[in-house]
Amino acid sequence: MADMSKRERLEATIHGEETDRVPVALWRHFPGDDQSPLDLAASTVAFQRQYDFDFVKVTPASSFCVRDWGVEDEWLGNQEGTREYTRQPVAGPGSWQALRPLDPGQGTLGGQLRCLEAIRTAVGEEVPFIQTIFNPLSQAKNLVGRQNLVAQLREEPEAVKAGLETITATTEAFVGAARERGIAGIFFAVQHASRELLSEAEYAEFGEPFDRRVLAAAEGLWLNVLHLHGNRVMFDLLAGYPVQVLNWHDRETPPSLTEGQARFPGAVLGGLRQWETMLRGKPADVYREARDAFQQTGSRRFILGTGCVTPITAPWGNLRAARQAVERG
């Protein structure tokens, strides 16, 4: 069949229709560059021009959405490119209640909007791009620390909910502003829908209601991706979220791609191990894993990618192999 545009290919994939090939997308952090909106935009665009993926995931430092509340962090060489938090301003229940909504046009949030504007100018209408949005619980964790968050939501639930209200209102406003910059959707990163961290009842109380408000702000966008981070994920609890694509660590934790496809109506995204294959493997390993993913999914309703961010030290040959794998089929 004739070559499809990136949007045509992705939309057909989401709806289970025939495509000219399987879509593919990888993404990574750009430590150092992610401290400047225009440097992050330039690195993101250069990465896309090198590999020609089917969409661009804009990947700022996770602190971009909480820095204006007083968070401080630094990159210490992590191979994922993620930064370590050196100051988390929420100390106790009173701190949650003292949080005030942020203006998305100002500070670090405003800088991220300028990053999106620069990316849109560079890639035009041909390349869909999506903005990473950390869900309210993930942002709360970055304000107080993972263990502190879990303890406080169990001991001081109303205080934590007050903080989540403020975080959610700010995130809703930011998603609205990002829409005006031409995003195709959001990459909605959820880090606590794991039975290793919370029970399903706890997530239904502290996660889902706030998640759904953010996703409502993204309603009408055509490429919203839900990312379930970690092991023992609450797949079925979140598979009903209003998104078009679902991404999780399918090679490390259930369900498999085949099982996930049967339990989610849109497209599934994954198939490649970020560490064993993309970082430590060889191109032949990438091709082999991609072929297995094609077999699991029948090359329908499937986007080739990793379960999480591609390590910044992954060999370029492995990234090229991922891109070439969808041409080989």
Image: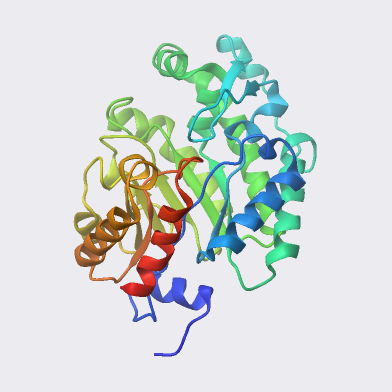
- Give the answer, above or below, for where 91 lies relative to 32: above
> Horizontally, is 42 left or right of 191 in the view?
right
Q: Residue at x 57, y 22 (%)?
A: 76
The spot of residue 267 in percent (x, y) is 35, 63
- Give the answer, above or below, for where 91 lies relative to 85: above
Q: In the rendered image, which quarter contains the C terminus?
A: bottom left
Q: In the rendered image, which quarter contains the N terminus?
A: bottom left
Q: Nearer the viewer, residue 211 or 26?
A: 26
Q: Residue at x 39, y 60 (%)?
A: 322
> Horizontally, is 61 left or right of 272 in the view?
right
Image quadrant in which you'd find residue 195? top left
| Residue positioned most to the bottom | 1
Q: Nearer the viewer, residue 31 or 263?
A: 31
Q: Nearer the viewer, residue 196 or 176?
A: 196
Q: Residue at x 67, y 22 (%)?
A: 99
The spot of residue 2 in percent (x, y) is 44, 90
Q: Nearer the viewer, residue 100 or 250?
A: 250
- Give the answer, above or below, for where 79 lies relative to 54: above
Q: Residue at x 71, y 52 (%)?
A: 42
The spot of residue 188 in percent (x, y) is 49, 47
The spot of residue 117 in percent (x, y) is 75, 56
